[in-house]
Amino acid sequence: MLEKGKEVLMRAKSPARLLLMAGILVVPFICAMAQEPQAPARPPLTPEKRALIAELLVVTESKKNAIAVYNSMLDQQENEMPELVWQGLANSKAMQALSEVRRAELRKEMREESAMLSKRVRELFSVRIDFPQVI
């Protein structure tokens, strides 16, 4: 009986992790792709136009604004993703077989793992993506 309980816990924990990781990693990319317009081909910019654009970006503090938007997206994702994943798992047979105490423990663990994953995603994005270059 104890072995069956452990097996149920492992199955319940694994899908939660997978869904949580998928959500944390996929949502920013989907948002970025959705915002990227599909423009027709245009002639390359002249060096003068590039210089003017760079100056405009500095004057309007576009780097600061882009980072603020990015942080806002991640904050919202950090708040909503664990609850969305939990809602998806709460009605599963494996979760229903667990006691209320164990479900509460799993929910707490999932939130903690979500926070750690989100923190790591933030770190990697800030290291790997050059926001001024992207802008």
Image (cartoon, grey):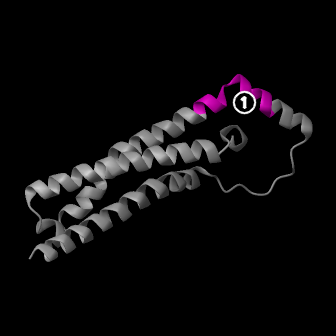
Front one among 14 and 1: 1
| Residue that protrudes farthest toward the front in the picture | 2
Residue in view at x 69 percent, y 40 percent: 135
Residue type indicated by callout 1: Leu
The quarter of the displayed image where residue 6 is located:
bottom left
**Is residue 61 one of those drawn in magenta?**
yes
**Is residue 34 one of those drawn in magenta?**
no
Residue in view at x 8 percent, y 77 percent: 1
Residue in view at x 15 percent, y 57 percent: 103
Q: Residue 93: give x, y in percent of width and height.
A: 16, 72
Q: Badge 1: how crowded within 10 Å, few (<14), some, or many (20+)?
A: some
Is 103 situated above or below 131?
below
Q: Which residues are magenta?
A: 53-65
Q: Tell me: 55 left or right of 68.
A: right
Task: Assign a secondary structure to mark 1.
Answer: helix
Is 26 situated above or below 9?
above
Q: Residue 59: give x, y in percent of width and height.
A: 72, 22
| Residue that protrudes farthest toward the top in the picture | 59
Q: Tell me: 19 left or right of 59.
A: left
The residue at which mark 1 appears reads as: 57
Q: How many marks?
A: 1
| Residue that protrudes farthest toward the right in the picture | 47
Q: Residue 79: give x, y in percent of width and height.
A: 34, 43
Q: Residue 58: give x, y in percent of width and height.
A: 73, 26
Q: Tell me: 8 left or right of 80.
A: left
The kind of secondary structure the magenta stretch mainly shows is helix
Front one among 51 and 106: 106
The quarter of the displayed image where residue 65 is located:
top right
